[in-house]
């Protein structure tokens, strides 16, 4: 598998209001520890580093953070990414209409590449999650592959309806109730979906602006399904995922990794 065309996109333009007050961007909140590469002593490890390491293991060499004004502590902390053996770039959010618009800021740079996409405040296992998504994409020639996990609270996730071959038929964004058991947490996609998303976001921008509601990535993937793009899945039956964007789940993560 060639890794020269794999890049990562991380939307980090959120306000983090569910965790107020914290003294830093939520992406830099320390959870767990790692061993310092020089002196060998434990040092704190921040939330978003887990995602960066997942992307690096899967072959991404360049990762794009999309920021909002004021979150300068993220580039100040990571710099050029060399300490993680990555090339990091930082782009500014232009349109505050949700994660798809943040991801689309990288369009010019990633339009011909395979994209690994994840949220910086979601912790997940196994370590080879992105590798398995890329393998599934190569096997099925899918435009998008979603990494799906069994989640206890459907109202907190985009739930997915799958057929017997793992193809994604429907995405239900945070339903109040659902019989579905899998929600998606990470994704990889190819140039066809990047192009579709770029065009689709332009088409619905006025509607989104007027409604005052943010658009989710799941809603864009659902629109792609309606237009005939192939969306596949990998279900991690023994995997775990945890959105640490709320105080309760942040507490769970701190306890499990400390």
Image (cartoon, rainbow, N blue to C red):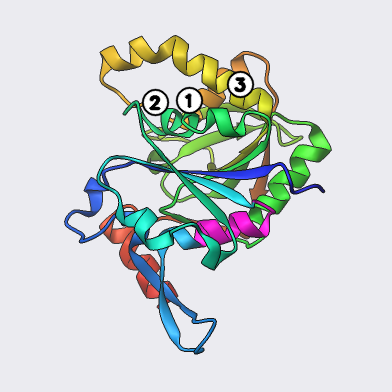
Marks 1 and 3, Cα distance to the nearest angstrom? 16 Å
Q: Quadrant of residue 144?
A: top right
Residue where numbered disc 2 is placed: 215
Q: Tell me if 8 is positioned left or right of 251 in this view.
A: right
Question: Is disc 3 surrounded by few (<14), some (14 to 19) or many (20+) residues within 10 Å?
Answer: some
The spot of residue 115 in percent (x, y) is 62, 39
Say which residue label 1 marks. Answer: 219
Mark 1: secondary structure: helix
| Image height of 188 relative to 22, above or below | above
Image marks 2 and 3: residues in contact by CB distance under 8 Å: no
Q: Secondary structure at mark 2?
A: loop
Dominant SS type (magenta)? helix
- Image height of 144 relative to 71, above or below: above
Tell whether 128 sits left or right of 67.
right
The residue closer to the viewer here, 86 or 217, is: 86
Q: Is residue 77 visible?
A: yes
Query: CB of mark 1 within 8 Å of CB of mark 2?
Result: yes
Q: Quadrant of residue 12?
A: top left
In this rendering, is residue 188 above or below 33? above
Alpha carbons under labels 1 and 2: distance apart: 7 Å
Tell me where residue 165 appears, x and y as whole percent: 76, 35
**Residue found 42% across the figure and 74% down from its top:** 32
Q: How many marks?
A: 3
Mark 3 sits on what residue? 195
């Amino acid at each position: 598998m060639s890794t020269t065309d794999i890049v990562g996109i991380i939307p980090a333009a959120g306000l983090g209001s569910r965790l107020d007050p914290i003294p830093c961007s939520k992406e830099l909140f320390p959870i767990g520890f790692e061993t310092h590469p020089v002196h060998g002593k434990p040092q704190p490890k921040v939330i978003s580093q887990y995602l960066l390491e997942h992307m690096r293991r899967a072959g991404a060499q360049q990762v794009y953070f999309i920021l909002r004004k004021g979150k300068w502590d993220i580039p100040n902390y990571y710099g050029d990414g060399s300490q993680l053996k990555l090339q990091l770039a930082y782009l500014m959010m232009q349109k505050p209409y949700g994660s798809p618009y943040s991801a689309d800021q990288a369009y010019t740079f990633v339009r011909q590449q395979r994209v690994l996409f994840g949220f910086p405040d979601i912790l997940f296992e196994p370590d080879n999650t992105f590798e398995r998504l890329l393998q599934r994409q190569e096997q099925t020639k899918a435009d998008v592959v979603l990494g799906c996990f069994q989640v206890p609270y459907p109202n907190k996730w985009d739930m997915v309806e799958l057929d017997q071959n793992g193809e994604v038929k429907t995405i239900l964004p945070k339903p109040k109730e659902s019989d579905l058991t899998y929600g998606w947490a990470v994704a990889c996609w190819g140039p066809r979906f990047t192009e579709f998303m770029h065009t689709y976001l332009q088409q619905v921008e006025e509607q989104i602006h007027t409604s005052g509601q943010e658009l989710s990535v799941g809603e864009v993937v659902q629109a792609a399904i309606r237009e005939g793009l192939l969306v596949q899945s990998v279900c991690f039956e023994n995997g775990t995922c945890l959105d640490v964007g709320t105080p309760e789940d942040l507490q769970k993560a701190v306890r499990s990794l400390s």
